[in-house]
Image (tube, rainbow, N blue to C red):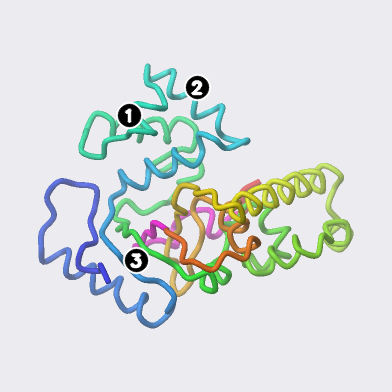
Amino acid sequence: MCAHALRKSIPLYAEKEAEDEAEYFQPWVTTAVQGIHLSNGATADEMVLEFLRAEIDSPRFGTQVSTALSAHASTPEELIDKGDLKNLRQNSVRAAILGHYRGYPDAAFFRGFPADALWARCTLSPEELKNARYAKIIEWVHVSRYTRLISVAVETIARGDIGSLARNYNLSEAETDRLRKLVAHVRRVASDYEQGKKYPKLIAVRAGDQLVVLEGHTRATGFVLSGREEPVEMLIGSSKSMRTWAPLTEMIL
């Protein structure tokens, strides 16, 4: 367990406050999501680095990350591949890059995200990962048949019944095409996992008694689809105000 090691992204953190917030995190871990094992404290800076590590190779966001890196006269090797979390300048630049294309820390995809979120490195059993939910991103809502459950999306993808799903929900041709591309991408990632490839850590948040994916929807789905049995590494954020994060309540198109 690492509840005592939870950290904010600041150099010094009052011990009493840390104990109070650790006590808030602990009951959820031990009662609501039994498959989670906390291993160590993390910071928002680490979350940002893992976010960029994942999306620099993303078909959807990779170009935007590269453009933002160039705008800050930085290279992927310096800031991402060999990123130094002890380097305050690097942390600042990485946060600015994530802000450039994702709105971090409090706009666009991060609108309403609580500034006081605590982060922890965790391992999650595959069975518990299946029960995690997606943020309200339209394609993932569709493929999970409006449940937002990874388990339901995996069942849909495994059956290959995107056509019937599109008919049932009266999806447009463009929506159906996006869904087919998403499914193809998930299958490629699942194949990668089956062959032993390692991806960046998944990122999720605690929202009440639910675990919701923040970054890594495709990887989380691909991991479950692959049938791999080992625990998966994650960064998990927690805040009493997490439900103010917009993608928990508003559809992202």
Viewer-closest of 34 and 246: 34
The amino acid at mark 1 is Val
Q: Earlier in the sequence, mark 1 or mark 2?
A: 2
Q: Choose top left, top right, bottom left or bottom right for residue 97.
A: top left
Disc 2 marks a residue whose amino acid type is: Thr
Tell me the kind of residue under disc 3.
Lys
Q: Nearer the viewer, mark 3 or mark 1?
A: 1
Label 2: how many Cα within 10 Å (few below 14, some 14–19, many 20+) = some
Residue at screen point 46% across, 66% down: 231
**Circle 1 residue:** 93
Q: Nearer the viewer, mark 3 or mark 2?
A: 2
* Residue placed under numbered mark 3 in the picture: 240
> How much space separates mark 3 and mark 1, taking CA atoms?
28 Å
Q: Earlier in the sequence, mark 3 or mark 1?
A: 1
Helix, strand, or loop for circle 3?
A: loop
Q: Secondary structure at mark 1?
A: helix
**Magenta region, residue range:** 234-250
Is 92 positioned to the left or the right of 60 in the image?
Answer: left
**x and y percentages locating residue 181 in the rendered image:** 75, 44
Q: CA distance from mark 1 to mark 2?
A: 13 Å
Q: Quadrant of residue 53?
A: top left
Q: Which residue is mark 2?
A: 67
Disc 3 to disc 2, C-alpha distance: 35 Å
131 left or right of 15? right
